[in-house]
Image: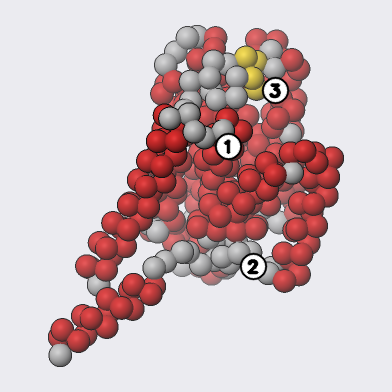
Amino acid sequence: MKHWFQTKNMIVLFGVVLIYGIVQLLNLNDIMPPFFQLNLILACVYIIMAASLNLINGITGQFSIGHAGFMSIGAYTSAIVTAKLGGPLYLALIAGALSAGIAGVLIGLPTLRLKGDYLAIATLGLGEIVRVIFMNIDYVGGASGLSVPSTINWTWAFSLMVISVIAIHNFTTSTHGRACISIRENEIAAEAMGINSTKYKVLAFAIGSMFAGLAGGIYANYMYLIHPLTFNFLKSFDILVMVVLGGLGSLTGSIIGAIVMTFTSALLSGLSEWRLVITAVLMVVLMIFRPIGIMGTKEFSLNFLGKKGERNDSSQNK
């Protein structure tokens, strides 16, 4: 069994390195079209966003639809560090992630006592409040937006995406993550077993917000210009669609949903007025035929190799 886990980790590591190497090679030789480069970076951003929202909605069982607000906090904070203060990129990304995480704690403490639709309405309103605040601050460009030097490349985006996914996965499989899952399954039973539901809800909300801020920092330092309207309700809705499409509670599903939605939006870029209609129709079809999403609550695994390994081990023992 130990040998199987080592083999599985090596296969996953090889796949990650292979994907990075192929894309990096194409970039260095100017083979990859700029439009495809753009969408690969956006895919990394949205994978972080979907994985972090899945931690809140899928793992802990809350219903937040204001994730774009935390993305905007991270984006504007990191933009201030790089564009206004002339700070280094790594410091800007850290500042963006921490500011969004702190905002998540401050917002989560009063709102996470709410449940269901009430929590959704509260997070939606808070996300819109954050957007309107940035729209009225002249220091960050107000309604005209803020120009930011583009310093993010494929290496930065892909590396931060991998680190974020690993961190969220490790949290989910830890004792704290299992406590969050128990709250999702039955909050009353979890509290009866001594689990502080408010504590773990706020913890998951803060971690999800922090990674949303990191994604916002990556976005801001790649897109040259950030604008308050970029982080409106539709952005939160897009992220929610990615999570639901992949499967609530599945980190693998969030990754798949983010990739599918990113490149579907790219293919529909010439039909911008129909994009939302087509997305809504796809969601209706999904809810009818696959309401649990592509992956449900399951994670991708190489079970066929695991079974083969188990058979070989048993034959050797005999």
Q: How crowded is mark 1: few (under 14 residues within 10 Å), some or many (20 or more)?
A: few
Q: Is residue 17 left or right of residue 168?
A: left
Which residue is nearer to you in this view: 107 or 84? 84
- Among the two numbered marks 3 and 2 on one chain, the one whose residue lies closer to the N terminus: 3
Instruction: Label 1, secondary structure: give it.
Output: helix
The secondary element bearing badge 3 is classed as loop
- In percent of the image, x 63 and y 46: which residue is there? 263
Mark 3 and mark 2 in contact? Answer it, CB < 8 Å: no
SS under mark 2: loop
* Residue that extends furthest to the bottom in the rendered view of this protein: 318
Q: Mark 3 points at which residue?
A: 227
How many C-alpha atoms fall within 10 Å of the one at disc 3: few (<14), some, or many (≥20)?
Answer: many
- The three-letter code of the residue at mark 3 reads His
Q: Name the residue under label 1.
A: 36
| Residue 260 rendering spot, x and y as whole percentages | 62, 52
Q: Quadrant of the N terminus?
A: bottom left
Q: Which amino acid does label 2 sit on?
A: Ile
Which of 113/215 is in front? 215
> What residue is shown at x 56% (from left), y 55% (from top)?
256
Query: What numbered label is drawn on residue 292?
Result: 2
Q: Residue 158 carries which label?
A: none
Image vertical order of residue 243 relative to residue 94, above or below: below
Cβ–Cβ under 8 Å for marks 2 and 1: no
